[in-house]
Image (cartoon, rainbow, N blue to C red):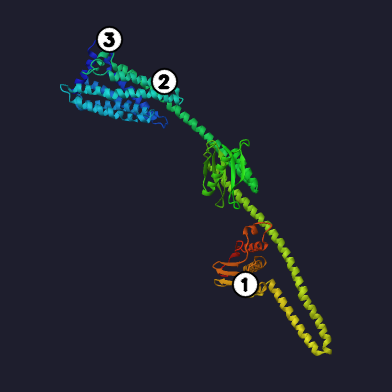
Amino acid sequence: MFGAQIYVLRLTFYGLTPMSEIATFLQANIIPIYFLYGLAHFVTGFAVALESGRASQLRLSRALPFLAAFGITHAINEWIEMLSMISAEIPTVAREPMWAEILKTGWMALSFFFLFEFGVRLLMQLLPKSLRWLRWLPLTSVLVFLLGVLWIARLPDTNFAMRIALAETWGHCVIGLPGTVLAAVAMLAQRRSFLRENMPQFGSDLVGAALALAWYAVLDHFIGPDVPFFPFSVINKTTFVALFGIPVEVLRTIVIAALAYFVIRMMRVFEVEYTRRLESANRARFAAQEEATRELSVMFETCRILGTSLNLNQLLNDSITRIVSMLDPMIAGMIYIYDPGERALVVRASKLREETAPLKPSERGCGKQAAQRAFETRATAYATDAKTGTAMIAVPIFAQDEAIGALCLAHRAAFSNYPVMQTLARQIGIAIENAGLYAQVQEKEDLRGHLLERAVAAQEEERKRIARELHDETGQTLTALAVGLGGVEETIPKDPALAKRQIAELKLLSMNAIENLRQFVSDLRPALLDDMGLVSALRWFAQQYADRSKVHVDIEVLGAKRRLPSQVETVLFRIAQEGLNNVGRHARANTAMIRLEFADGSVLLTVEDNGRGFVVSEVMGTQSKRAWGLLGIQERIELVGGKFKIESEPGHGTKVMVEIPVNSEQ
């Protein structure tokens, strides 16, 4: 009943004035016009929905889902209206109930809300934060609409059809009209955004869409049903037909079709954006490939240089030259190595990309600070010269997991590829370690050569001493025995008593000769070492040494005593022998201590004195001051896989400590 009344009211919009033939034709085909009107909305919404599903960085894409929702929901609204007209012309079809009319009015308001939300969201992305309160306008308009509907429902002397017409008009005024105007303004604002993003070809499409929305605001929101409120009592569908002779739905359909045309053309912006993003990604990929190629070239050349020489100075200079010349945007580079003598980092190699543009003192100081921080923290360090803006980046250089220096590079442009620097620093550390090992090997070879020369010389000196001892003492004693025996032979017949005294003297002389030979043999290798073991041999030698040198020698034996392999006992005995001999020759000590400790899996020997001491680094490291006796001890220990350590300071004595691994069962 109520649906029929509303439809009759609508028919009066087209039947109160005379019409031309075109108007008559259009009025007769008003239902297809409604279908086309809804179809134009649907095409707009569907096309936008398809494009809004793309992944895009354009701000427009965030608002498009609401424009798609407006097109589809409003198309459904117009098609429902069309179905209502069809059902009104069929007498056997039941009329629409009241709740259906209310739902249609609410659905229409929902479609306008989506258009309002589209305009607000698109405009919010282009406005400053101070205008963010605009986001609440769509919800506010819905609230005002609901309050107005409640007021309309309470109007006296008004039938249900008029109330529905008033509610629809109120929805057009408070939701549809401001939403459409705001959407048109947002599209014009988006045009300026497209111009800034160098996409002017879509500016005209946005202008066309904005104009279509502006005409839509006039034709759909200003020209509505005839209701007793100004201006709709003057400007409405009835007066429009009277003035122009055609239903307003025709122009609405044309306007929405134009909107669909311009919006679909505007959607091509996503294809352009996708093409640009693809080109940008390709350029970025090619740039990354070129950068990776340069970095690989730098690392390859640096590794090649580091592998071509074991001369530390040469490889450091060549590597920093290659790094600075090939690694953009570096303008200078320094390699700092820690110097134990100076207890500070020192520059071992440096390079400027342009020799005519040296670093300023403040820049060099900034680089030193970054290198020191990287060395101390064992992590990448940064520093920037406040005067010139030159940035310094330093990465630590490691050798055997210990920081030994830092690689420092200077740049004035952006640089972020720190893994390349860290890789180069690791390669430099490996090269420095290899060069150090090579230098140690060379030093040991030189040392071994010197020790061999000294061993040969010592053998010759020992042979001379043995020959001298045999000639001067044993030889002379044997000669005296021979002469004395000759004299006894002549004396026996003449004076037996004298001969007897001479034989006693010769006997004493031979006993002294035997004792001297026994002492001589003991000095070469004491028999106690083979017969009684290391502990007895050390006690015997300590006593002999104390008697000869007047130095008090204490012996301390710890742990369970046991026999050791012959080679180990010989090495330990010779070390103790050399240690005490050094005490007598150099230490000027009056007390010495020999401590022998038998531990599980090893044996430890300590020779300590209270002499004048010395600087260990000078004696063990300087060619002219080397203690060849101590170096000989070190060589002996290395032959049996042991460890050797010396502690000494001027005025505080010397302690020689030796540890040799042995099988505890031996």
Amino acid type of the residue tagged 3 in the rendering: Ser
Q: Nearer the viewer, mark 1 or mark 3?
A: 1
Q: Is residue 133 visible?
A: yes
* 539 to 368, vertically: above or below: below
Q: What residue is drawn where x is 71% and y is 74%?
A: 520
Instruction: Name the residue carrying label 2.
Output: 204
Determine the image quadrant of residue 626: bottom right
Q: Is residue 158 above or below residue 507?
A: above
Q: Are marks 1 and 3 in contact (CB under 8 Å)?
A: no
Quarter of the image for residue 525 reads: bottom right
Assess whether mark 2 and mark 3 are in contact (beta carbons under 8 angstroms): no
Q: Residue at x 52, y 45 (%)?
A: 380
Q: Which label is found at residue 233? A: none
- The kind of secondary structure element at disc 1 is strand
Residue 373, horizontal then vertical, whole percent? 53, 46
Quadrant in which the N terminus is drawn: top left
Between residue 415 and residue 419, name the one nearer to us: 415
Q: Please tell me whether mark 3 sits on a helix, a strand or a loop.
A: loop
Label of residue 20 in the image: 3
Question: What is the crowding at mark 1: few (fewer than 14 residues within 10 Å), some, or many (at least 20)?
Answer: some
Give the crowd class for mark 3: few <14, some 14-19, many >=20 residues within 10 Å: few
User: Which x, y percent locates residue 557?
Assistant: 57, 72
